[in-house]
Amino acid sequence: MADNNQEIGGIHFPFPFTPYSIQKDFMAELYRVLEAGKIGIFESPTGTGKSLSLICGALSWLRDFEQKKHQEEARLLETGAVPSSNGKDQPPLISSSCQETPDALRPAGEPDWVTQFVQKKEERDLVDRLKKEQIRRKKREERLQQLRHNTQLKYAAKRERQEEEETERLLRLSRDILAAGAEARPLEQLAPGEEELVLSEYESDEEKGTGNGLDEDEDDLEEEHITKIYYCSRTHSQLAQFVHEVQKSPFGKDTRLVSLGSRQNLCINEDVKNLGSVQLINDRCVELQRTRHESKSRAEDKEPKRRRQEKAACPFYNYKQLQLLQDEVLLEVKDIEQLVTLGKEAGACPYYGSRFAIPAAQVVVLPYQMLLHTATRQAAGIRLQGQVVIIDEAHNLIDTITGIHSTEVSGSQLCQAHSQLLQYMERYRKRLKAKNLMYIKQILYLLEKFVTVLGGNIKQNPNTQSLSQTGTELKTINDFLFQSQIDNINLFKVRRYCEKSMVSRKLFGFTERYGAVLMPPKEQPRLAGFQHFLQSLQPGVTEAPTAPVEEGEARAPRPASPLMHIEGFLAALTTANQDGRVILSRQGSLSQSSLKFLLLNPAVPFAQVVKECRAVVIAGGTMQPVSDFREQLLACAGVEAERLVEFSCGHVIPPDNILPLVICSGPSNQQLEFTYLKRELPQMMEETGRILCNLCNVVPGGVICFFPSYEYQRQVHAHWDKSGLLARLAVRKKVFQEPKRANQVEQVLTEYSRCIQCHGQAGGMVTGALLLSVVGGKMSEGINFSDNLGRCVVMVGMPYPNIKSPELQEKMAYLDQTLPRTPGQGSPGKALVENLCMKAVNQSIGRAIRHQKDFASIVLLDQRYARPPVLAKLPAWIRDRVEVKATFGPAFAALRKFHHEKSGLS
């Protein structure tokens, strides 16, 4: 596949083949958005080569940007003078990399000689920094060049690592022998290793400058962050697909790309990875790094206060090996799986190796949860100042931001955390400093008040506590704090204490170790009672034994400490009062009741991304309706209208390869309107079955039928089974149902695909398969029903969200209060409901038509689809071709003709 250099508007876009015209338009518009520092919403239907357009458009801009910057650097180093600029035509060197203080910020009325002196000093500082950057860049390029041409360096480093490990093993063995000979008794009769569970002295409530986790000899791992592109998508599989597209593109060999992932995906320490829970893996990893630095500081201390039991740090966190892995990561484009394999070969941690490679990378690929959550972003070493962010598959971006920053805690978790923390405080009371005790007591008080506000008693078992009042109550943050009687506690200080003291990790270690710890006889009964109480709090212990896990069903990972989870809820309560709500859900028992924080304004966390970045691109295959992004996210985040650019392109398929129909009535003239009140009527379910029987007679291959919910799908299936319609359907199509369990989806899809393939070749009465699916379920997103797998997509009704949901009602009320009312379009709250419905529809019907030669019909069964405001929310390439059929006869004739002609051609 030869590279094809495309020149569009004087800009060269390398491309692996001759691009479609819409791809040329996409790349040119993307280049303009990045160059001008805009915010872009880009829509390109699935099958139009969106990923490749993003890659070639963005990397072409980055290529030109770096070239201009290097030219400006060379000129600046040669002359030693900074050119004057008017702010608009700043060279890339000044505009994004330096971020110098503008003259406008200096005090007015300064003498000229002062201004000149300050300016010359800035110029000298800038030149000095450029020289240092240049030296670092040359060193990095030399290392990569050596690795590229001399593979023996890798093997030499591996041999050195093995020798170091053997030396360290012998040293540990010697220390153990000496410690055993000394027979040193731990202070206060604590068990070996238990001392690390005791909280260190908490010195200050104020933030301190914290290191980046590197020793002094590891400074070379930290470089200046060059201008780069952060590419985000929803899942690791989508990110891996993007990386493979980069590898195949003309930029594949010359791009420094880093794939970021969670510790769960990247950890190669089996002892840590086997913990299962994401939270446990994270905390154990951090603890190992902390142990490593503490042991080093103790070794450097000439007079240690007392001997501590030595604890092994992670063997994969080693400077020399991380340096090698960092360079290897930048040498060639690799996905997550390849990165893990490389880490195992190098004996270095892929998680930290990839993080240390971020500054020098040109492209960083990561899940967008990692970018959108501030604390996670900072922990990963991501700096957005002056950078480019591309968020792909962004159709559910608003929901994702809301979900990331919303959190729920159960009554069982609150009671368990309180009991654990109380026992911890009693056990180590004499060893804890005053501030630690003060904050622990504040946390205990908070937990008690949270249980009380739910109507429970912290001293009783939550599984056996019945609540006098049940139902759902919704509060503003301030009202919740007042009702809980915790408005006098500074939650910001408590949150900071939890972060700095790592109290939840200490508590988790205490509860994990406590059964094996040797205690004085008088301590044992108390702790035995504690253990019995903790077991009683576990769900299912006091009930009948649960059913065994089915074959193939993934077992649930071990839960993390409940206090770790509650810390997230405490942090959420520091949100501004108007931007969130607290939902009190009181069920039959305290253990089933919960407190939930709901984020109402997703623009708050997103505003920082928009503010810091040079440019942000929000892209997807089906972004309609875009008004949500414009109004709820970008406008509220402070994006001005002139900075926003919207781009939408058509599909690459010929116009006659798609037949979208709105059918308003069925074969027996039953009006199709699947409202909550009408859709369960027998005649409505009968009419739906008759329509599908007719469709299955003329549509070859696979038919996917989407229902609004799992419950309605099961109800309709049961009705058809009784009435005989299911048997009539089975004459032409084998019927499959979408499973509710994720682990069964692959099996159903495989059987569905095999059925279509077999019957398509064999002939006979059965011509394929019918898959009954659910909007928002496993089949409605990320599944590829191309060619014969999806010759027709049917939408039964309009999948409106549950209007009675307290969360949705509060969100609607919030939008009505904060957003302006658009004339002729109803309230912002009502528009939200319409948009949620149509986003779900667009995602579902987008499962078909996956490439240029594909064809399919799209059937929308509900007369409400014929309304102009609803049609306007369909993707343009579908909306422009929709035919509204008032009766079933003409609709069936159009479908029969379409599939007869297309099947004959195919």
Image: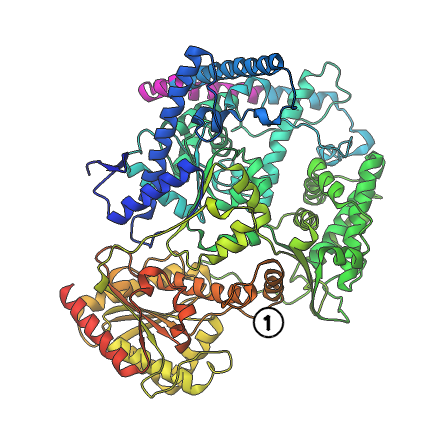
Residue 840 figure quarter = bottom left
Residue 552 figure quarter = bottom left
Query: Residue shown at 23%/62% (left/top)?
Result: 655
Q: Which residue is mark 1?
A: 804
Left or right: residue 620 compared with residue 210: left
Q: Amino acid at mark 1?
A: Lys
Check if residue 146 falls in the magenta segment: yes
Query: Residue shown at 60%/22% (left/top)?
Result: 173
Q: Nearer the viewer, residue 674 or 159?
A: 674
Residue 182 figure quarter = top right
Residue 658 location in percent, x, y?
A: 26, 65
- Furthest residue in direction left, as rendered: 904
The mark tally for this picture is: 1
Q: Nearer the viewer, residue 213 or 751?
A: 213
Residue 817 location in percent, x, y?
A: 63, 61
Q: Nearer the viewer, residue 4 or 741?
A: 4
Check if residue 169 falls in the magenta segment: yes
Residue range highlighted in magenta? 142-170
Left or right: residue 81 compared with residue 803: left
Is residue 138 in sight in this rendering? no
Q: Main secondary structure of the magenta part?
A: helix
Instruction: Tell me the SS state at disc 1.
Output: loop
Residue 747 location in percent, x, y?
A: 37, 61
